Image (spheres, helix red, strand yellow):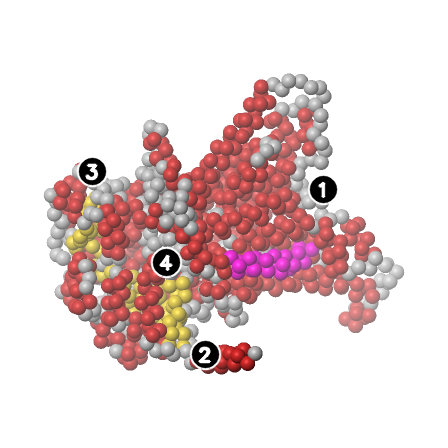
């Protein structure tokens, strides 16, 4: 009996202590899609909790994350850290006062020291910082090394070489690009943006994005004509109807088992390629997507942005987490363990050295290109929302022969002009 | 039920009498095969390790219809993630919806079916039509704002209350109550019973078909609810079945066997409920329950 | 009663003092409203207010995120009906969708229900199996069928190849001429079992006497179906006609999960357009106008049925 009483009082005491402790803890919430990604990212992000017991991160697994976040934030709720799929969404939220300006935090916590200059600018809305960009992306031309060696092909450097090689690859019975948009319909836009940058050139795209030339400019027409020709020839996925039905795993398998020779896709594909190709035993490598001039050009894109909810009860703590999360150390750790596309921050050479050289080269070349005026634009990061939807929705009608390239670009002009006039264009770093 | 009428005179059945049932069974079998093949693949895949789910589906061979390397891994992972709790939550919500929503809808259905009052028809049309007609996505944001003002995000109230009003159910109750003979009610009223008393002691006992059908409808719609629970209660402790299943679909990949395993479990409950009670379901919808 | 009501009460106090009036008030006002009150309160908050807000939003330039909006009258409607060419195309797809669902599942369900009502053994097993697809989540159904219809390795292509039949290695979901009907096929695979169960249960509630009478009159199978079964299940068939017609204008999830309206808009319907406008293009006000238009179509269908009913149809 005595023991029981003693134990009870100890238990009560402990309970009281923990509940007192609990009152001092600030919890920062973040919503995240559950699955393989979170399995790897989660534990690294949660190691934040070991630093300061009074500030804790809670990751709430959430299906259909962006739709749920948007509805909740608009309705006055939602997580402390608001993640959006791109700058145009940040723009809308900032205009509505749903997320907080971050300039004071940026100054106080020294974000400028580790973010690339242009990268912080991507988060500006009317001159104020509202978001931090995450998951740096660029499109690459991947190829199956075994297939190339067996046929004596070399990776193309110019668009002419790509055209010639494509003919050869198709004639040899391979699918030219392992592709399909059934799992992610907006995939269409990858090629529209990429062909514009590589064929019309980044400077023309910049001019069009800033309203100096129309999208119906000759160079844009040429770019879209070439893309349409590639689609019509069935280079993508082995036929237009197959392009519309190939699912993600199918197209990965096509490149890995050597039934397809190449693939134009974002750097996010690397994680999958590593898995699929180590299973099939066939090699993969990449080169920059061939350009008309032969210049080594890279489009730049962002997979995600992070902001702080205006409803957050403790924005300070949220900023503290962001500082830790975007630090080169954390980003480096996530890059090496999960192959996560890093935020645009300076990651040490040491960390990069631990990576597969093919992966390290992506980020080295990318930062080299951005420093030397050889960078281009991805549609989902630099085009305003209505134009972006137009780009990937309507281009299918060009490919299915319903409208011409000229119709398509005229339509884009119209949609884009309205958004330009309304001032809805995401920040475009001047060049 | 009348016994089948006895044949007037015994005679040898013609060959056709044997062939016809065989033909019927064969046709039905064909239909069943069309339905069952895809289901078998899904069922088998839920007992297969995730990386082998598509092994025999691409290209398709008969082996895809049976588990490859049989394992309970998907079900174990599912329950380790808290699927059991989600099932419990959903049961609780669905039953609460049946009781509370059934009450509110039955009362309203009774008023619409039995009372004459000013504005009745307008009100009925407004209540029924609005819910039938308005796309759910459109009202999600205003509704969320409202629930948020009450402070009901991440609460049972927030999950439960918006699901209580169900137009189809009100419609069923009204149809059914309107056809009850007036004499039944008058007799009780003359004896001095209150309306509530009439409803409880006279009407309810003869309303089994509509009660069963309404309960089924409400139970199943709450059981299958996805979008609203996803928005209003992101907390793990309040998760419902459909949301828990959908978590298997990640941003960069899907855990197929868990998705399918969860769906199998989620499908069993409505099937077990609907099959035995289907007769009432139709009786209530066709309004012939009093025959 | 008439004796009591000789002098009509006028003021509220007189009214309250008057027994007949009190009864009438109770019977015709208070009690009905008390009965409706619980539902009405929920309904006002959950459906009516959001719906009214939806209608208001359809007359604004709301983007979907920023709460500061401008009232623009009927501009959205004007744009929708007279300028947006894709709307007509979507509407056309909705109508095709409706035609498909008002025929194929009804014929299948009637046929199968008739068959099932004749068999004596194993009926429960058959109908349970045929009902399963209806309760599967749409994510699962669409996933299964996207795989089965794969042009290279799907069940259809593989089986046809094994049997030496050519012409089935087709990307049904990737062609502009077959995408919509293929999705309708998949949605129907999931839906028709529900109709079948309804029809079957309705058939079983037809008094057997009627069939016996038909037999005595020398009716064959078809005549039996035509004169006994069909009239017996008519109410549920017509009711489901109405519901299916309404649902056809709200069709969304199967199309969204399989093609999102593609390829090249071949399977675009009003609801998928609405979703894209509201959540991708930031034109929530315009999307709301589309929602209102869908509601008007649905209201029109209900109206047609109400009219038919007034004219004495037994629906």
Residue plotted at (40% across, 63% down)? A61
The range drawn in magenta is B87-110
Query: Which residue matches tag 1?
Result: B291
| C-alpha separation, residue under disc 2 versus residue under disc 1 | 65 Å
Query: Which residue matches tag 4?
Result: A35
Q: How many marks?
A: 4
Of badges 2 and 4, the one in the foreground is 2
Of badges 4 and 3, the one in the foreground is 4
- Name the chain letter of the residue that bears numbered label 4: A
Q: Quadrant of residue B249?
A: bottom left
Q: Please say whether residue C10 is one of the residues in the magenta stretch.
A: no
The numbered disc on residue C145 is none
Residue plotted at (50% across, 60% down)? B85
Task: Tell me: residue B223, above or below residue A10.
Answer: above
- Name the chain letter of the residue that bears numbered label 2: A
The numbered disc on residue A173 is 3
| C-alpha separation, residue under disc 3 versus residue under disc 1 | 70 Å
Q: Which of the two labelled residues, at mark 2 and mark 3, occupies the earlier sequence position?
A: 2
What SS does tag 2 mark?
A: helix
| C-alpha separation, residue under disc 2 versus residue under disc 4 | 32 Å
Work out whether disc 2 and disc 4 sit on a shared chain.
Answer: yes
Q: Nearer the viewer, residue A389 or C80?
A: A389
């Amino acid at each position: 009996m005595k023991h029981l009483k003693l134990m009870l009082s100890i238990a009560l005491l402990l309970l009281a202590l923990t509940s007192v402790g609990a009152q001092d803890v600030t919890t920062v919430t973040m919503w995240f899609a559950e699955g393989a990604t979170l399995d790897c990212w989660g534990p690294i992000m949660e190691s934040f909790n070991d630093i300061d017991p009074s500030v804790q991160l809670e990751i709430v697994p959430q299906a259909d994350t962006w739709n749920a976040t948007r509805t909740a934030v608009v309705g006055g709720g939602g997580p402390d850290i608001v993640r959006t799929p791109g700058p145009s969404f940040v723009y809308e939220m900032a205009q509505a006062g749903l997320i907080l300006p971050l300039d004071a935090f940026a100054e106080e916590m020294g974000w400028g020291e580790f973010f690339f200059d242009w990268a912080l600018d991507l988060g500006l809305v009317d001159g104020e910082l509202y978001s931090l960009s995450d998951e740096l992306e660029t499109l690459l031309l991947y190829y199956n090394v075994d297939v190339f060696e067996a046929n004596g092909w070399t990776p193309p450097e110019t668009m002419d070489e790509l055209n010639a090689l494509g003919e050869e690859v198709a004639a040899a019975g391979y699918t030219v690009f392992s592709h399909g948009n059934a799992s992610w319909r907006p995939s269409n836009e990858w090629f529209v943006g990429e062909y514009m940058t590589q064929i019309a050139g980044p400077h023309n795209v910049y001019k069009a994005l800033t309203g100096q030339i129309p999208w119906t400019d000759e160079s844009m027409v040429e770019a879209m004509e070439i893309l349409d020709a590639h689609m019509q020839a069935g280079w993508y996925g082995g036929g237009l109807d197959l392009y519309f039905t190939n699912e993600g795993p199918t197209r990965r398998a096509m490149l890995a088992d050597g039934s397809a020779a190449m693939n134009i896709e974002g750097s996010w594909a690397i994680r999958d390629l590593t898995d699929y190709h180590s299973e099939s035993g066939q090699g993969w490598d990449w080169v920059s997507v061939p350009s008309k001039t032969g210049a080594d050009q890279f489009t730049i894109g962002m997979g995600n942005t992070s902001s702080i909810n205006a409803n957050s009860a403790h924005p300070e703590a949220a900023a503290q987490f962001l500082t830790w999360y975007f630090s080169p150390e954390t980003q480096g750790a996530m890059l090496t363990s999960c192959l996560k596309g890093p935020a645009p921050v300076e990651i040490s050479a040491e960390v990069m050295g631990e990576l597969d050289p093919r992966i390290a080269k992506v980020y080295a070349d990318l930062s080299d290109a951005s420093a030397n005026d050889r960078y281009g634009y991805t549609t989902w990061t630099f085009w305003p929302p209505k134009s972006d939807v137009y780009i990937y929705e309507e281009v299918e009608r060009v490919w299915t022969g319903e409208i011409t390239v000229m119709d398509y670009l005229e339509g884009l002009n119209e949609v884009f002009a309205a958004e330009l006039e309304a001032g809805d264009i995401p920040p475009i770093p001047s060049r | 039920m009348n016994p089948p009428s006895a044949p007037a005179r015994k005679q040898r059945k013609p060959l056709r009498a044997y062939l016809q049932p065989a033909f019927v069974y064969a046709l039905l079998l064909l239909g069943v095969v069309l339905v069952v093949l895809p289901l078998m693949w899904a069922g088998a895949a839920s007992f297969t390790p995730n990386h082998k789910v598509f092994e025999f589906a691409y290209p398709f061979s008969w082996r895809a219809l049976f588990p490859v390397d049989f394992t309970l891994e998907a079900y174990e992972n599912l329950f380790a993630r808290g699927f059991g709790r989600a099932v419990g939550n959903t049961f609780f919500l669905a039953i609460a919806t049946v009781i509370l929503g059934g009450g509110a809808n039955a009362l309203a259905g009774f008023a619409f079916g039995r009372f004459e009052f000013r504005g009745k028809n307008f009100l009925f049309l407004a209540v029924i039509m609005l819910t039938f007609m308005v796309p759910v996505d459109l009202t999600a944001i205003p509704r969320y704002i409202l629930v948020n003002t009450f402070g009901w995000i991440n609460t049972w109230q927030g999950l439960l209350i918006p699901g209580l009003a169900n137009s189809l159910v009100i419609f069923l109750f009204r149809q059914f109550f309107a056809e009850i003979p007036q004499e039944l009610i008058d007799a009780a009223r003359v004896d001095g019973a209150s309306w509530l008393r009439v409803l409880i002691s006279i009407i309810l006992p003869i309303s089994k078909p509509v009660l069963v059908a309404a309960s089924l409808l409400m139970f199943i719609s709450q059981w299958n609810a996805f979008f609203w629970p996803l928005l209003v209660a992101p907390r793990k402790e309040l998760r419902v079945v459909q949301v828990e299943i959908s978590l298997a679909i990640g941003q960069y990949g899907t855990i197929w066997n868990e998705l399918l395993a969860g769906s199998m479990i989620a499908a069993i409950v409505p099937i077990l409920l609907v099959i035995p009670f289907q007769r009432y379901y139709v009786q209530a919808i066709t309004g012939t329950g009093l025959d | 009663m008439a004796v009591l009501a000789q002098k009509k009460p006028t003021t509220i106090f007189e009214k309250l003092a008057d027994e007949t009036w009190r009864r009438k008030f109770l019977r015709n006002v208070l009690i009905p409203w008390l009965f409706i009150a619980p539902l009405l309160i929920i309904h006002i908050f959950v459906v009516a207010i959001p719906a009214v807000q939806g209608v208001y939003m359809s007359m604004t330039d709301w983007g979907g995120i920023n709460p500061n909006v401008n009232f623009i009258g009927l501009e959205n409607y004007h744009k929708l009906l007279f300028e947006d060419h894709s709307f007509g195309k979507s509407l056309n797809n909705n109508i095709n969708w409706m035609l498909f669902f008002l025929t194929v599942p009804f014929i299948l369900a009637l046929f199968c229900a008739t068959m099932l009502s004749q068999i004596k053994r194993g009926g429960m097993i058959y109908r349970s199996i045929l009902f399963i697809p209806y309760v599967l989540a749409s994510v699962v159904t669409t996933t299964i069928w996207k795989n089965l219809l794969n042009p290279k390795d799907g069940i259809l292509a593989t089986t046809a190849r094994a049997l030496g039949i050519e012409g089935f290695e087709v990307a049904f979901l990737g062609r502009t001429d077959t995408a919509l009907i293929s999705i309708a096929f998949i949605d129907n695979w999931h839906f028709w079992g529900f109709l079948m169960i309804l029809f079957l249960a309705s058939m079983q509630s037809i008094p057997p006497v009627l069939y016996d009478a038909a037999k005595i009159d020398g009716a064959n199978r078809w005549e039996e179906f035509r004169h006994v079964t069909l009239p017996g299940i008519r109410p549920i068939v017509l009711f489901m006609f109405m519901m299916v017609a309404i649902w056809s204008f709200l069709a969304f999830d199967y199309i969204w999960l399989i093609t999102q309206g593609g390829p090249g808009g071949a399977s675009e319907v009003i609801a998928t357009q609405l979703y894209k406008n509201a959540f991708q293009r930031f034109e929530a006000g315009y999307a709301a106008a589309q929602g209102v238009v869908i509601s008007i179509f649905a209201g029109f269908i209900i109206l047609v049925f109400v009219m038919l009913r007034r004219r004495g149809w037994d629906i």
